[in-house]
Image: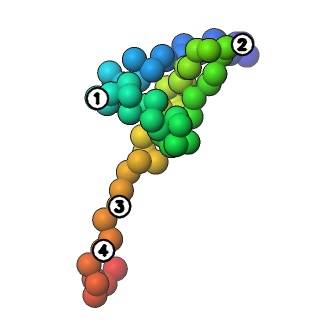
Amino acid sequence: MTPDLPQRLLNEHEVAKTRAIRVATLRKWRTLRRGPRFLKIGSLVRYRAEDVAAGIEQQEVHPAEPAGVAQ
């Protein structure tokens, strides 16, 4: 069995760029306790790639089905 390799953490600029959102949006989400989970390492904010993917999925909105639609 191989030991776990250290995971590369993303900074807020990398997350914002890959998700096509502003850094200010990530910062606002953090203050509102929304969006992707993050790590605080001293004064640094870092994200795990899997937390970013999960956090963005949490922002997904599912429209309500029209009334009377049978499944």
Name the secondary structure under disc 4.
Answer: loop
Label located before the other in sequence (3 or 2): 2
Q: Amino acid at mark 1?
A: Ala
Q: Amino acid at mark 4?
A: Glu
Q: Residue 41's image quarter? A: top right
Residue under pointer 3:
62
Residue at the far bottom in the pictured view: 68
Give residue 33's quadrant in the image.
Answer: top right
Q: Nearer the viewer, mark 2 or mark 4?
A: 4
Residue corresponding to mark 1: 20
User: Looking at the picture, which amino acid does disc 2 mark?
Assistant: Pro
Residue placed at 45% from the left, 35% from the top? 28
Eyeballing the image, is 70 above or below 5? Answer: below
Q: Position of residue 19 (x, y in %)?
A: 33, 29
Q: CA distance from mark 1 to mark 2?
A: 34 Å
Q: Are marks 3 and 2 in contact (CB under 8 Å)?
A: no
Label located before the other in sequence (2 or 4): 2
Foreground mark, 1 or 4, reads 1
Please say if the residues under marks 3 and 4 sit with CB atoms less than 8 Å apart. no
Residue at 46% across, 48% down:
58
Front label number (1 vs 3): 1
Q: Which mark is residue 65?
A: 4
Q: Is residue 11 visible?
A: yes
- Image mark count: 4
Estimate the spatial distance between the alpha carbons at disc 1 and disc 3, rounded to whole Å: 21 Å
Dot 3 amino acid type = His
Q: Is residue 40 left or right of residue 65?
A: right
Q: How is the image coloured?
A: rainbow
Residue on which disc 2 sits: 3
